[in-house]
Image: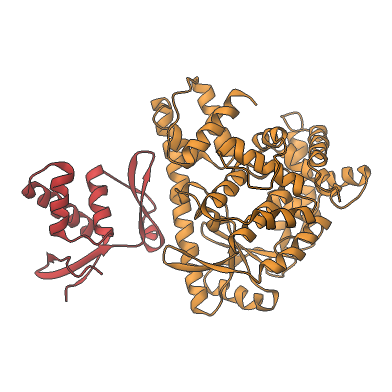
Chain colours: A orange, B red
Amino acid sequence: MDKIGRIFLQAAALGLDRNRIEDPGLSQDEWRELMQLSADQAMLPIVFEAVYSVIPEELEKEYRAVALAWICKQVRKTESFLESYRKLLEKGIEPLVFKGIVCRDTYDLPDWRVSSDEDVYIERDAYMRFHESMKQLGFKSTDPNFRSEHETIYYRKELRVEGHWELFPQENRLWEKMNALTSEMLKRTVHLEIEDTRILVLEPTDHMIYLLFHAMKHFTLAGVGIRQICDIVQLDKRYDIDWTRVASVMDSLGGGRFTAAVLDACCNLFGMAMPEGWEPEDSTDLIEDALEGGVFGHSTEDRIHSASITAADGTGHNTAYSLFKTVFPSREVMEINYPWVVRSKLLLPVGWGVRLFRYAGKIGKGSSPLRSIEIGKRRLKLLKKYDVFQE
Amino acid sequence: MFPDRAVLRRGKQMQIRTDRSYKYREIAGEYYLIPTLQAAERSKTPLQLTETAAWIWKQIEQAVSKEEMVLRMTEEYEVDPVTAGKAVEQFIEVLLDQGMLEETEAV
């Protein structure tokens, strides 16, 4: 791990508890590198909280403005979401909320942990009522014809809500298993009060299992970010998690070794205690991968494209198929940068064309298909190291 | 509502409370009120507060009466009751003028 990565992790751990870092003696360029890494990991406000008193004055103003803008936007989005949720409740609709606001609630500084969207789940039978209500509340859907097999995305001004009738997509055998397991979780929901609004959420151990599922899903695509590791640490800090149940479920998915590595990272980076009954798995490679990949592994175009190789491996196909999928990725992978492809089946080939055209323009300017394949192959080794896909 | 908290405004006894669409946050050692919902429709610009103003806002949020607030301020900032009273009155006036407090007629 390089110096900036090490300081980033230290500052992130301190910022989570509103503690400050001692002056690490960085040059102006190194400070910029640190703040860029923090932004890539969607953790700039948390890191800024730890460094604002030691960062050079001219940079302090610049990054304070960025941190303030991120936090203000999150505060507005949270209020907008909660207001919408209350209106849905008035209409007799009670969506299950997961990730985003539920994770933020476990942080001492909730709005510092920014989310690009909020996720809700509504049973398939009740979904159309939810959909109509969202439209009445002024939301626009990116997929009015329901082409996606598991979700619809809604926008209203700054707020983006993902409405799910399945928690995971279905095109990958691992995710299919995850969907099968989540049906049990949906029978054990509880309520959580956030700013005077009572929201329906997964029971904490189930939410932990969900976060680990979700981390594993992103690990099989482009990567897990440091913030996903923080979410796990914070959830463990806030609630009494039944780690025996977590072990049983994650083992049944072939995710036991991956989970042990994630827990090892949680302990090494953020001081979490290793849960009883768990043996740590060396997380060095996982942490390096997380630092390089940014939030959800989306730090570079090459890396996003490499997800086609790792995702294809999860379907059990050979290398030739994997390479084909690098050029023509699944809708799930395409959605990362081209969310409009979900609107219609016809838009997926259009998306491939736009992607190839854009990518061709970047070859020689830092991006390269060969690099995507290299990253993909390296990440496949990592997946194998942690037994993901080994059943 | 804050039953023991009243200010004289436009010749009437009014009860006040913070407008819930403004959210108070302490960010990296500085204090801000962040407009959300209807308040953000007017302006999204956060309002930076001094430490004393932030302290008064928090007292209003906690439904502390004006008399109690003045008393607490004399202890917290070691000022005399007249100075504390003026500071509280002036800031509440500013907040009311800016529409950042909700007021209802005192019962």
- The residue that appears at 73% across and 34% down in the rendered structure is A362
Residue B80 picture location, percent across and down: 7, 45
- The residue that appears at 52% across and 79% down in the rendered structure is A91
The answer to whether residue B15 is left or right of residue A76 is: left
Residue A56, quarter of picture: top left
Residue A245, compared with residue A219, is above or below; it is below
- The residue that appears at 42% across and 43% down in the rendered structure is A68
Given residues A385 and A119, the one toward you in this image is: A385
Residue A157 picture location, percent across and down: 51, 59
Residue A134, compared with residue B77, is above or below; it is below
**Residue A247 visible to the viewer:** yes
Residue B15, quarter of picture: bottom left
The answer to whether residue A212 is left or right of residue A91 is: right
Given residues B76 and A156, the one toward you in this image is: B76
The answer to whether residue A263 is left or right of residue A348 is: left
Query: Quick one: which residue is furthest to the front in this view?
Result: A277
Residue A320 picture location, percent across and down: 93, 43
**Residue A339 visible to the viewer:** no
Q: Number of marks in the image?
A: 0
Given residues A385 and A219, the one toward you in this image is: A385
The answer to whether residue A155 is left or right of residue A62 is: right
Residue B10 picture location, percent across and down: 12, 67
